[in-house]
Amino acid sequence: MRHSIHSPSLISIEDLHKSFPMGDGRIPALRGVSATINRGDYVAVMGRSGSGKSTLMNILGCLDTPTAGRYALDGRSVGDLTDDEQAFIRNRMIGFVFQAFNLLPRMDALHNVELPLLYRGMDSRERRWRSMEAMEAVGVSDRARHRPNEMSGGQRQRVAIARALVGEPSIILADEPTGNLDSGTGEEIMAIFDRLNQEGHTIVLVTHEAHVARHCRRIIRLRDGVIEEDRPIV
Amino acid sequence: MYRNCLAVFLRNLLRQRGYSAINVLGLAIGLASCILILLYVQDELSYDQHHENKDRIYRIVVSDTAEGRTDEWARTPSAWGPVLMEEYPEIELFTRWKPPNTSWLIGYGEKRYEEKHFIFADSTVFDIFTIPLVQGNPETALTKPHTVVVSETMATMIFGNENPMGKVISVDEIYMFTVTGIMRGMPKNSHFHADFLASFSTLAASGLYDEPTTIQNSDRTLYTYLMIKEGYAPEDLEDKLSQFPVRHLGERLETLGMEIIPYLQPLTDIHLHSNLKLEIKANSNIQYVYIFTSVAVFMLLIACVNFMNLSTARSAGRAREVGIRKVLGVRRVQLAVQFIGESVIYSFIALAVALVLVHLILPEFSRFSGKELEMDYDSTWLMPALLAITLCTGIVAGGYPAFVLSSFRPVAVLSGVLKAGVPQSHFRKALITFQFVASIIMIVGTVVILAQLEYMRNKKLGFDKEHVVVVRLPDNEAVQGYPAFKDKVLQYPEVVNLSTTTSVPGRLTATSFIQPEGYIVEDTPLIPTIWTGFDFVETMGIDITSGRSFSREVASDDYSVLVNETAARTFGWEDPIGKEFKYTHTPDYPPMHVVGVMADFHYHSLHQRIEPLLILFWEGGNTMVVRLSSQSLARGLEILQDQWRESYPNHPAMESYFLDQDLERKYAAEQRLGSVFIAGTVLSILIACLGLLGLASYMAEQRIREIGVRKAVGATISNVILLFSKDFTRLILIAFVLGVPISYYIMQGWLGDFPYRIEMSWGVFIFTGLAALLITWLTVGYHALKAATTNPADALRSE
Ligand SMILES: Nc1ncnc2c1ncn2[C@@H]1O[C@H](COP(=O)(O)OP(=O)(O)OP(=O)(O)O)[C@@H](O)[C@H]1O
Ligand SMILES: [Mg+2]
């Protein structure tokens, strides 16, 4: 892995395009998106359904590759990494939180949280220790031995956040983390993100709801695959 | 309702083409193997079944015990038949069957034919056996001396378009036979075969044989068949028969310390249950029928297991259909019938494919099995058997999936609870483990059989079996001409050495009453003996460990003996040289002395332990062994044939064979077994792989989301592949632990029959385990790789 050059912008994307094959042709989801995200940023990505939010987040999280454009994460160009190098980046630098939680149903919470550390080859005692810390940080350490279907939605999302946090990533990406939760529970989850940001974590999240976006300090609004608005929240 | 089911079935069949193809192909291969093996087994079981009186026909076999050694003979002394007939009213008829020792030269006009299937039989042969005559009267055909009944094929060959009846043929140029009947060709599935049936009375009339007036035991020239009167139990007759030898030979038996017991062997048992000395031809073994049948059932089971596996795996996908039908009020039984019906349809499609496969393979399979097998759809058994097997396969294969599918509760299904957990995955794992166990047993079996075969072929026999030609000296004249012939051929460097003998390795030895020094008459064992001329030991490459072989320089060598080490050990001789032998029943014959000891060599096939063996000197043996130079085998054989034609113009065709090829034939049964196992292993692994492939693709589909999550948190491609193979690998390990002891036990049992055998080493099992792992990984690998390289974003989006 190339050594990172320290720069204030953690993420820099330039003229990103992404299109999907559809029937005979392709439909564009992103049509030239450029932005920089700095360390410590707390960004809300908004926009109508189908505007390309998830597509953008997947590319930022190295879950998908752009059709064209440049993406540099912490100074490294992500475009020309091999599959295994991308896996390495997902493992070390990115914590992803999904709307649908995506916990593995046959494992208890602790094992779900441990998963990223498992792929670092960390020994099991340290894995467990760190996972418990991460679960404590989001307040679900008492559910460590429960399986996902034995927990509420809010608890599941906390476990998912703990999983995103446990590897101490450079950035946390969350695609509609409160989308499947009632508003009260959603607020609790946002409080966790607020605290994490205050502690120095860089966070980018997607939301449809203004009151969720209001927790952030910057808003990027997409429309039909291009940035319509990118402004700080005061 | 069922019309709708059919539509659903067809839709599924087409939509899931890959899955349907795997299912059908797996079943088809299983069915095809099963059908082929069935044909083989049916043929084996059909031997001698065509005789109308088969349930009343018995062959008399004789067991004699002396010196703690029991021999069982397929032949009886010649006088037994008539005497038994006189003494036991239960016997309706008997016939004796005298096969030729060698072949005869049949002549008609200018034409000459070598004929091996020339048999002398009592005229009752047509009353006992079902041998239909096309021409002639079975009642009278063989009553007079010098009459013969000829098979249709031979008759056409010899007489062409002439009417054979009443024509005269010559046998060995001296005996004349009148054709009194034409018989239909004997079916192949018969323990005997004759192209010529000559009247038994000819033998006495032409001085070939004296009808003995007393019962004795020493001549074992012919087979005696009895037909028991209706209503009599063979067991009772057999009981009475045990007294027969004592009554007639009591005194003699007592002096010799021998016991002779006759048995009744049912005609239909001969082919599969009889392996006695002097059989008409080498019979089969019921053991192999069992083994082959098990292999067939095994393969069908593996195919069924595949089907069950794939169907239950897919069942989750059909849960919604079940839910809706149940909500509509369809009863569970009806659903089960629907699903079983589907699998029965599948198996009939598979049957069609299987029949095509069978027709493609059958010619090759027939050649390999040495049988003329055919798919005779008109026969009474084939169609019903096919239908029954296919139906059973369908029901067995569909039964479990039907049970699982029809048990889904509609609420659970429709609310989506079922979707998350894959039902009955434990049962499926058990099924896969079963397949692995089966495959491991098959692989171990194949490796062990092939290794044993290789061992038997290459084991040092104690003599050099290669480059030796065995030639029959057809008559006395030929025997007398031998010394001159020997001098002539030895001029050529291609001919290394030659000798005459009464027998060669792989063929029967005589046992003679010869009394070794230190033994009294009563204790004298029967010792296998052959009589050879000079140079036998040298020609065969047998080692002499002490003393010397026969020598022209020593005049007294007419009365010399060679013993093998086992014989020396059996008689307890430290230094055998100079020890004396006498003929037990010929006190006037000069005593013979041991001049040399031979290193033990395998006179018989490796199925038998090395026995004591004597070589006595006699130049009159009717078999010649010739060692040719290894450099110019073909040229050597040519020289022999040329010289033969010159020396024996009466017998222009030299009858010969290569010793090593003849010995090789002793292992035909093992070779065939090996081939069946290779084929069975390849096919069962193929079927199992088809199942694995289907299951792996299903698993990849089921776990796509999980794989997406794992990749999202940093799993690499190799992590995912490992995850995928881990499950299968664990199953293989379980199967390995189960399969090793089972296959060890089975193969140890098989090896136990061989006195000279390989040791099963760990290597066999390690090889098997690695092979199973490798095959599985390759099979599962494709889907694992595909799953591992999907984009996590795509994986997570899928519902
Ligand atoms: N795998 C795919 N194949 C084809 N089209 C896709 C795929 N993924 C996204 N799209 C299309 O790309 C466009 C953007 O989709 P995206 O999921 O990014 O929208 P979104 O802003 O996240 O919407 P939502 O708020 O509903 O989640 C849509 O028109 C969508 O149909
Ligand atoms: Mg989205």
Image: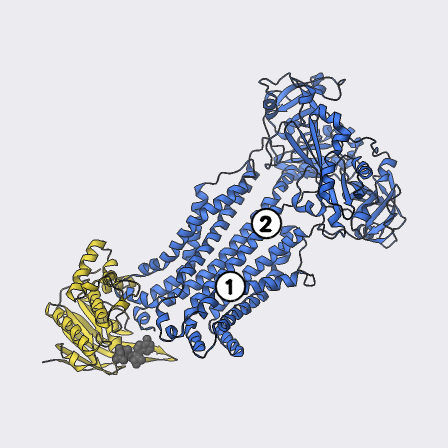
For label 1, count other residues whose C-alpha is less than 10 Å away and answer few (under 14), some (14-19) or many (20+): many
**In the rendered image, what is the letter of the chain coloured yellow?**
A
Q: Residue at x 43, y 72 (%)?
A: B318
Q: Which comes sooner in the sequence, label 2 or label 1?
A: 2
Q: Which type of secondary structure does the marked residue at label 2 adopt?
A: helix
Q: Position of residue B763 (x, y in %)?
A: 44, 43
Q: Residue furthest right?
A: B166
Q: CA distance from mark 2 to mark 1?
A: 24 Å
Q: Nearer the viewer, residue B595 or B414?
A: B414
Q: Are marks 2 and 1 on the same chain?
A: yes
Mark number, residue B397: 1
Chain designation of label 1: B
Q: Residue at x 50, y 50 (%)?
A: B442
The residue carrying mark 2 is B290
Residue B329 in sight:
yes
Chain designation of label 2: B
Apparent side of residue B353 relative to residue B770 in the rendered image (left or right): right
Residue type at numbered disc 1: Ala
Q: Residue at x 75, y 25 (%)?
A: B251
**In the rendered image, what is the letter of the chain coloured blue?**
B
Q: Residue at x 63, y 23 (%)?
A: B563
Residue type at numbered disc 2: Tyr
Q: Which type of secondary structure does the marked residue at label 1 adopt?
A: helix
Q: Position of residue B790 (x, y in %)?
A: 34, 67
Q: Nearer the viewer, residue B441 or B643?
A: B441
